[in-house]
Amino acid sequence: MSTSSTNRLPDLETVLLWEGEIDNLRIRELFGVQPVWASRLLGELTKHMGTRAARASAHAPLRLTSSAPARKNKQSPDEYLRIIGASAPESSNSLFLEDARKDLSIVAPGIFAAIVQAMRSGVGVRIAYRSMSQPGGSERLVFPHALVRAPRRWHMRAWCSQRKEFRDFNLGRVSDVESTDIPSLHGREKDKDWNETVSFQILAHPSLTPQQQLMIADEYFPGSSARQLKVRKCLLGYIIHDLRLGTDVTKHLPPDYQLVVHDAHKLRLINRSTIYRKQRRPCLAPTGTFVLRTTRRRT
């Protein structure tokens, strides 16, 4: 790992924020550096933090001061988890952290790289693709313009020559890629649902008791009774599904659904959704539009 203080300061500050203190030994554990480098990094961090952190003596750990504003502001510890996960294997302090998330996004690097190169060159690729309607696979000529890291897997946003529209393709279902020199006539600027954003509010489920609603609000959006989200229109279904947001307060009930989309019926109108009589859970339709239906079907 690089020992440059400039490169390491953001990581050191993040660890300090989430652990409350940091010393020479902890820096050595994290980055696998020698004591002299750890001392240099600790000195740079002390200077960088200014009045937000202090050391009681020359050999004491650097500790956040009680007045440091970042201590009270809720934020995601994911960046801290990334740093700890990449730390030297002998780091004993990482033993109290366990990342229970499992990555199911298995993608062949060669397929990923071919799509990246096609996007950079502005050309199409022929893919062998399997779908729920054609599990045996079929050939598609697509013109990709973006890769999307969805919660459980990677997707490619591309113009499909067969369907004559922009669609989402699950990279885990792409078994082969062949590069072409066919120029793309359907770039990202023409993908309306990619460029258009949708704003919506999420709040605690109204069926919860007032105390339960307050608890949920403090957990997910402290200081407010709701939270405003803004997402790309074609990704709306992924977000709603991943966050397990209820869209029908009469059918999506606690404890399975603790958060709901405010005025969800308006989202259906925005996305020109097809509403089925039996509504159970949100999903993303093949075209990337948000619908509610009993069964799921993807490209």
Image (cartoon, rainbow, N blue to C red):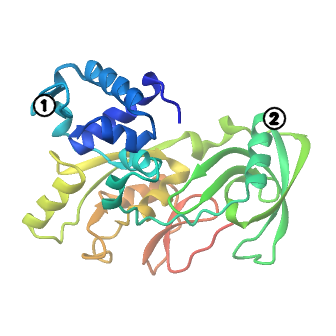
- 13 relative position to 3: left or right: left
The single residue placed furthest to the right in the displayed view is 181
- CA distance separating discs 1 and 2: 51 Å
Residue at x 40% of width, y 62% of height: 99
Which kind of residue does numbered mark 1 sit on?
A: Thr
Q: Is residue 2 left or right of residue 154?
A: left
Earlier in the chain: of badge 1 and badge 2, it is 1
Amino acid type shown at disc 2: Ser
- Residue 62 vertical position relative to residue 44 in the rendered view, above or below: below
Q: Is residue 268 left or right of residue 249?
A: right
Determine the image quadrant of residue 296: bottom right
Residue sitting nearer the eye, 269 or 60:
60
Residue 121, numbered label = 2
In percent of width and height, residue 20 lies at 20, 41
- Identify residue for label 1: 65
Query: What x and y, as percent, mark residue 143?
Result: 78, 46
Q: Residues within 10 Å of mark 2 (few under 14, many from 20)?
A: few
User: Residue 138: percent from the left, percent from the top?
Assistant: 84, 69
Residue drawn at the location 35% of the way across and 34% of the way down? 12
Residue placed at 46% from the left, 48% from the top?
88
**Residue 158, percent from left and from top:** 71, 49
